[in-house]
């Protein structure tokens, strides 16, 4: 594999990032993985395994969040993440309210902070927030007085998706130290890629970001992350590959010439699946554009862990909610 | 340009029979001149008014402010220009010199009646906030305005390159997942404007330079004798894009052009000291709370700057990055010279270069509380501002109380 450049997002934003011990003060929010230590990620994954055991029981419920109120604030359409969080909170016996709202706070004339404060005044203990603009959960976390879980903010972060990817990869591959994971496609606009870079490198994996130059980051550097423009060169070196959803408007915006050319260069086809080493896994954060970034035969092959990702998502989100709001806090 | 270092002098009398002020250890300077601020009136009074904006200017040591025409309606007709001038005369704490729009409605297609506006007191022309994207129109504006001795001030931004940009394109924007505003977006427009100034011989003034390549282009243009002048803001001299991340998507750090890297900051400082950059201008851009307490990408661009400009810039002096004499020159003679004006003799500002104070936006005179410096300790304070021989701001009693 040709190393073209060293790339992507070092975790510098939060004090304590990268420390090997769990933080001494209890965590208040789950906004991104950049401020999770390796030990803390392990703790989430172990807790998720315990949650998975609960999910295997005939009555899939634990009273861990009884009496707590979780409000799912979805400022961007979502089906799988919204339902996954709802089921996770219900499995923990929390009271769950979900609202969906389009547009930005400025368009509505009410500040995002005022909305969040209102929800807390109504009794919310946890705000799960999906927003089409980067950083929105940070604005709320600074001032609302409730635990905030980032369920995806613009192009920035999607920490629970990355945690469920880590959980799934660990289940399939074991220890991720020294493993090489390829993230393919529109990395520049992908919150899934960003959070995965933090999580995977924290667990000792090598990450290769693969895509056309117009869809990769240009500026930053991080040990353990490299850039590659040629997927066919990369595939034989990978332990797992994660094609990202390509938004069709990237072609109309000129970032790629056409979806046809994109599929030709970066689509996970059966032929490309053959180039992966034995035992390598295919992930996809969903929803898929079948026939563009991934072919249906690949998504349904024995190497695909895509359905497991969805199932594991509930256990991982239960773990995140429990670790923030459960227990004696 | 320092009028007096009053160390050792006991007091100063304001006028004959006026109050005597104990001035030991203080420095008397000419009143500051701001080439670039937004007073928001008419039309955007929920952000700022001429009364509050000029009170903020006085508190910041400014005795002359040039207000940008991106009001509603824009300052593009004699009627709106007169409204601003009349309001400033009746309610303003300091001198207000309006800048009129280059094009009608700042829409970038038809020139305003520039000769009439200049005759009535418009000191320059600018579509600030939007560049004049059409290069031919910009050429015509430069030529026409030059015929009656007025510069065109351009906000240098290639609108296609910067579309959607919320912060400087670089490592921080990539980490934060925010759309980037690339360095080249400024550089190409600066290069174009220099080319047009060279072609026409007219005077172009470049607003709020923010990048190292732009400084280099201006330096080379001045060496060639092209009539180009430039300004830089206090925030581009003191802050970087790291502040956006440090504050967790702090919308008070969202400004256009965006906060850049430390290398850009160093180049701007170098350009200021070597004379490439003529003036420090605040780009004071007050906004209402709701316009900043929101998602970063939805937030308005701008910093409420008039009241912190001197204190934040004094940080550069105290750390040995900027000579005090240069700072004073770029706040007084430099900006006045860009407009071909001399400094009024009855305007002055009394400062204590060593006084420490804490920025508290709730004590701002400005209606705009949007400052990334809230809670910061600054060293260097304006104590008294006198405009047209009248006290416009008296911070002496406040300083004594504190």
Image: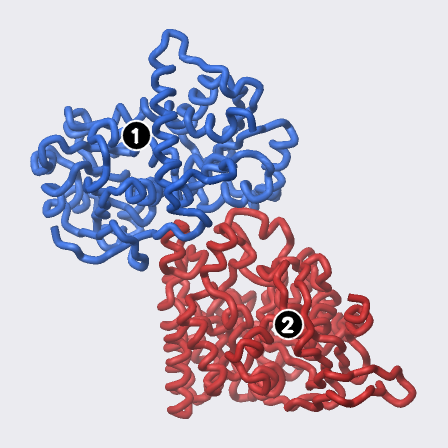
State which chain disc 1 sits on: A
For marks 1 and 2, give the CA distance: 52 Å
Q: Is residue B15 visible?
A: yes
Q: Residue at x 31, y 51 (%)?
A: A253
Which of A57 and B148 lies nearest the eye of the viewer? A57
Which of B147 and A323 lies nearest the eye of the viewer? A323
Q: Residue at x 40, y 24 (%)?
A: A84
* Tag 2 residue: B379
Which of B34 and A19 lies nearest the eye of the viewer? A19
Residue A312 falls in which quadrant of the image? top left
Q: What x and y, as percent, mark residue A6?
A: 24, 56
Crowd around label 2: few <14 · some 14–19 · many ≥20 (10 Å) = many
Crowd around label 1: few <14 · some 14–19 · many ≥20 (10 Å) = many
Q: What x and y, as percent, mark residue B60?
A: 68, 72
Q: Residue B146, labelled with which disc? A: none
Labels 1 and 2 within one chain = no
- In the rendered image of the structure, the colour used to display chain A is blue
Is residue A224 toward the left or the right of residue B201 in the image?
left
Q: Residue A167, labelled with which disc? A: 1
B67 vs B258: above or below: below
For label 2, the SS is: strand
Chain letter, colour red: B
Q: Residue at x 52, y 84 (%)?
A: B278
């Amino acid at each position: 594999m040709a190393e073209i450049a060293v790339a992507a997002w070092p975790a510098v934003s939060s004090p304590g990032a990268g420390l090997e011990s769990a933080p001494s003060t209890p965590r208040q929010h789950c906004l991104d993985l950049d401020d999770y230590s390796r030990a803390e990620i392990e703790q989430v994954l172990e807790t998720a395994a315990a949650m998975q055991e609960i999910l295997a029981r005939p009555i899939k419920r634990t009273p861990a969040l009884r009496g707590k109120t979780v409000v799912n604030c979805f400022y961007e359409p979502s089906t799988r993440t919204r339902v996954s969080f709802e089921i996770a909170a219900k499995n923990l016996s929390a009271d769950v309210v979900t609202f969906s709202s389009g547009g930005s706070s400025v368009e509505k004339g009410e500040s995002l902070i005022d909305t969040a404060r209102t929800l807390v005044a109504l009794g919310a203990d946890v705000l799960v927030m999906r927003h089409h603009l980067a950083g929105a959960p940070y604005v709320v976390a600074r001032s609302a007085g409730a635990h905030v879980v980032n369920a995806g903010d613009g192009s920035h972060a999607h920490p629970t998706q990355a945690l469920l990817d880590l959980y799934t990869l660990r289940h399939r591959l074991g220890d991720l130290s020294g493993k090489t994971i390829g993230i393919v496609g529109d990395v520049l606009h992908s919150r899934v890629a960003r959070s995965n870079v933090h999580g995977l490198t924290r667990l000792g994996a090598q990450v290769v970001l693969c895509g056309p130059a117009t869809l990769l980051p240009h500026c930053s550097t991080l040990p353990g992350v490299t850039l590659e423009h040629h997927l066919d060169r990369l595939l034989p070196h990978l332990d797992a590959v994660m094609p990202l959803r390509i938004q069709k408007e990237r072609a109309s915006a000129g970032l790629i010439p056409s979806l046809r050319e994109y599929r030709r260069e970066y689509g996970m086809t059966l032929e490309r699946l053959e180039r992966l080493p034995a035992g390598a896994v295919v992930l996809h954060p969903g929803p898929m554009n079948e026939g563009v970034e991934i072919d249906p035969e690949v998504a349904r092959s024995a190497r695909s862990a895509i359905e497991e990702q969805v199932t594991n998502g509930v256990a991982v989100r239960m773990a995140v909610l429990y670790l923030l709001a459960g227990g004696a806090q | 340009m320092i009028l007096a270092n009053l160390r050792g002098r006991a007091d100063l009398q304001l006028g004959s029979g006026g109050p005597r002020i104990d001035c030991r250890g203080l420095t008397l300077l000419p009143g500051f001149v701001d080439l670039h601020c937004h007073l928001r009136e008419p039309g955007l009074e929920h952000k700022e008014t001429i009364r509050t904006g000029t009170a903020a200017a006085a508190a910041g040591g400014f005795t002359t402010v040039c207000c940008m025409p991106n009001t509603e309606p824009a300052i593009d007709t004699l009627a709106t220009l007169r409204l601003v001038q009349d309001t400033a005369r009746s309610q303003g704490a300091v001198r207000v010199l309006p800048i009129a729009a280059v094009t009608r409605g700042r829409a970038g297609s038809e020139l305003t009646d520039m000769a009439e506006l200049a005759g009535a007191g418009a000191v320059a022309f600018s579509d600030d906030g939007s560049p004049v994207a059409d290069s031919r129109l910009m050429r015509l504006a430069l030529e026409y305005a030059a015929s009656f001795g007025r510069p065109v001030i351009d906000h240098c931004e290639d609108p296609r390159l910067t579309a959607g940009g919320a912060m400087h394109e670089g490592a921080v924007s990539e980490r934060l997942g925010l759309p980037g505003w690339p360095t080249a977006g400024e550089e190409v427009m600066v290069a174009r404007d220099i080319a047009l100034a060279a072609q026409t011989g007219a005077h172009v003034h470049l607003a709020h330079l923010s990048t190292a390549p732009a400084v280099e282009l201006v330096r080379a243009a001045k060496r060639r004798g092209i009539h180009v002048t430039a300004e830089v803001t206090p925030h581009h001299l003191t802050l970087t894009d790291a502040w956006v991340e440090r504050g967790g998507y702090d919308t008070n750090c969202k400004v256009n052009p965006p906060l850049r890297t430390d290398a850009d900051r160093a180049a701007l400082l170098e350009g200021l000291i070597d004379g490439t950059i003529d003036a420090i201008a605040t780009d004071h851009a007050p906004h209402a709370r709701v316009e900043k307490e929101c998602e970063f990408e939805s937030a308005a661009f701008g910093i409420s700057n008039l009241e912190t400009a001197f204190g934040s810039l004094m940080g550069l002096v105290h750390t040995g990055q900027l000579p005090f004499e240069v700072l004073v020159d770029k706040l007084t003679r430099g900006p006045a010279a860009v407009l071909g004006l001399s400094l009024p003799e009855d305007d002055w500002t009394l400062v204590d270069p060593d006084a420490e104070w804490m920025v508290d936006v709730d004590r701002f005179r400005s209606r705009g509380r949007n400052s990334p410096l809230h809670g910061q300790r600054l060293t260097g304070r304006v104590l008294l501002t006198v405009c047209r021989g009248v006290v416009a701001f008296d911070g002496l009693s406040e300083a004594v109380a504190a």
